[in-house]
Amino acid sequence: MKNSKIFVNPAAGGGKGRRVASAVVRYLGERGLKAPLVTSRGPRDLTRQVSRAAVEGVDTFIVVGGDGSVSEAVNGMLAAGSRGALGVVPVGTGNDFLKSLGVAPRWRQACDVMLASQTGRPIDVGRVNNRFFVNTLGIGFDAEVTLATEGVRVLRGDMVYAFALLKALLAGIRTPTVKLRHDTGEIEQSMTLIAVCNGEWEGGRFHIAPQARLDDGLLDVVFADRLNRRGVLRLVPKVMRGTHLDAPTVTHLRSARVHIEAAEPMPVHADGEILERGARELEIELVPKALRVLVLETSRSNALHIFPRRQA
């Protein structure tokens, strides 16, 4: 980790990024990892800063932030052609990417895991219309909930997503006809939401793709049929438990490529950040082993102890 930089999103976690950044630098420095701190100045600035650092020869990128910050950093790394390593210090609202990796969502423990990692773990990433995502891509009602989190300042943690879910339900549910092509076929029907997943978790507590693995060479696609408010409310507890794949209104498939065409514009989020507010067509593919993350190879096997799965 000789050529390292620490990148912080000060707005992550409702301002937690700003509050803990200096403590992270000090904690890592006391353990032998001395690196300069770079502060993001706004949306997509982290991508620019990381890309510039990659061109300058930085090969270890430590991100203090949430899922959106991680996604920005990964886009900066891959756009610059970097084969460096990514370290993550979680201070976001959901920290879903680290949950999928099996790393505890406490920043000191995440630092310790990162320092103990020797070569890192290679993982896949997704690409949608030339933008990369590391964890999940949400289309339709999934992204409507993400839109509803914008501007929420008072609430923290899981309460943000609970409030956003209620707000999105009250605003109404759209169920456009969608044509979804995958590796082995095509489906055309009305859909409430589509999640294209590299990782397992999204929205803090939603175990949207329990069978997904970050290094298996496939995307997990989970979509729900046409649902009304009552249908969504019935499905939510199952998604939180990770038991929804058996529901008759839910389809799960796995594919390396996915093409989506919608009859009307649909919002899209990538790693919890709104990518488009009205997309009609999406070309999605998996890029195998494109990223190296500084976690222990045993982290995934310990995930059930850190994030125990609730029983149905």
Image (spheres, rainbow, N blue to C red):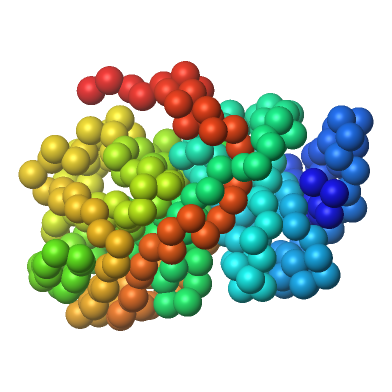
Q: Is residue 281 above or below residue 44?
A: below
Give the camera-side residue of 67 and 143.
67
Give the camera-side residue of 241 and 147.
241
State left or right for residue 64 relative to residue 273: right
State left or right for residue 165 relative to residue 234: right
Q: Quadrant of residue 185?
A: bottom left
Q: Residue at x 26, y 73 (%)?
A: 259
Disc tally is: 0
In the rendered image, residue 107, in percent from the top left (x then y), is placed at: 70, 33
Q: Is residue 154 above or below residue 264?
A: above
Can the viewer see residue 35 in this picture?
A: yes
Can the viewer see residue 230 in this picture?
A: no
Q: Residue at x 14, y 56 (%)?
A: 225
Q: Is residue 218 above or below residue 203?
A: below
Quadrant holding the C terminus: top left
Q: Residue at x 89, y 53 (%)?
A: 36
In the rendered image, residue 54, in percent from the top left (x then y), is placed at: 75, 67
In the rendered image, residue 300, in percent from the top left (x then y), is placed at: 47, 32
